[in-house]
Image (spheres, rainbow, N blue to C red):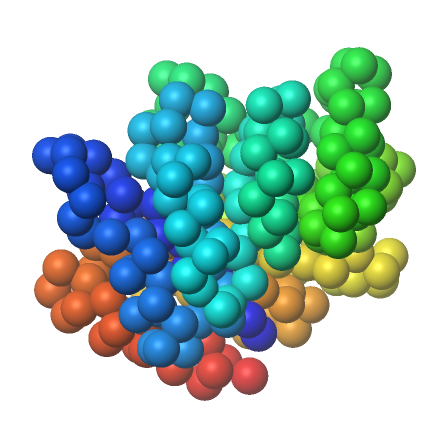
Amino acid sequence: MRLGINIDHVATIRNARGGNQPSPVKAAEIAANAGADGITAHLREDRRHISDIDIKALKESIELPLNLEIAPTDEMLSIALEARPERVCLVPEKRLEITTEGGLDIKNIEDKKKYFIQKIIKECTNSNIDVSLFIDPNLDQINAAIEIGTNIIELHTGEYCNSVNTIKELDRINKAAKYATDNNIETHAGHGLNFDNVIDIAKISYIKELNIGHFLIGESIFMGLEGAVKKMRNIIDDCK
């Protein structure tokens, strides 16, 4: 199982005071040396943490694959086509949300937005950029994602992480991951994962990649980023 490290909140800390420190690029390099398989960065429309300059610097400086999370907009498509990350992950985005609140509602979006997502998939694929859709662990959403033409999804694990009934939510994720895999869709997962709740997710063999950020950046205050990433790497590997 691959481990992607989201370095957004290194930029959040930097932006709180301005200047250049701490550096998201340095965080990505440390994560790489600690066992990460990829780097994730969310370029929000309001640029609240990661900036356009960060994306350019990451693409130029790191050897690991870059997973660029973006909202499905014309502006973000243009940026992705210019930056050429290895993968684009399409996510829903609300200006007032603290963090991503759920997956894209592919099943119920209007035709105009559906066609635009298909356009993003086509143009990125033509530029050798993989595209994944961040969706809830729901079979109807997976079917809609298949119809729209994607071959990668990332399951939103936020409900599982926040739920008191983790068994029910874990079952939803497991069934969704199996269903996607059975339909030749590569399955990733992420959001809200920590050292404890990641264990049962990492045991799901249908999931090929986990993307984890906020918790590890926070935990790095106490044990260093290298130590936090290594511990997460070891936990995931022990779940094989």
Residue 218 percent across, percent down from the top left: 21, 54
Which of the pair 204/25 is nearer the observer?
25
Task: Indicate the quadrant where residue 147 lies.
Answer: top right
Residue 24 seen in this snapshot = yes
Q: Is residue 210 above or below residue 20?
A: below
Residue 192 seen in this snapshot = no
Residue 23 percent across, percent down from the top left: 24, 52
Task: Indicate the quadrant where residue 75 lies.
Answer: top right
Q: Residue at x 36, y 77 (%)?
A: 33
Q: Quadrant of the C terminus?
A: bottom right
Q: Residue at x 86, y 57 (%)?
A: 183
46 lies left or right of 23:
right
Residue 12 percent across, percent down from the top left: 25, 39
Which of the pair 154/159 is nearer the observer?
154
206 lies left or right of 103:
right
Q: Residue at x 17, y 68 (%)?
A: 224
Which of the pair 232/72 is nearer the observer?
72
Q: Residue at x 30, y 70 (%)?
A: 30
18 lies left or right of 237:
left
Count of picture labels? 0
Q: Quadrant of the N terminus?
A: bottom right
Residue 69 percent across, percent down from the top left: 53, 41
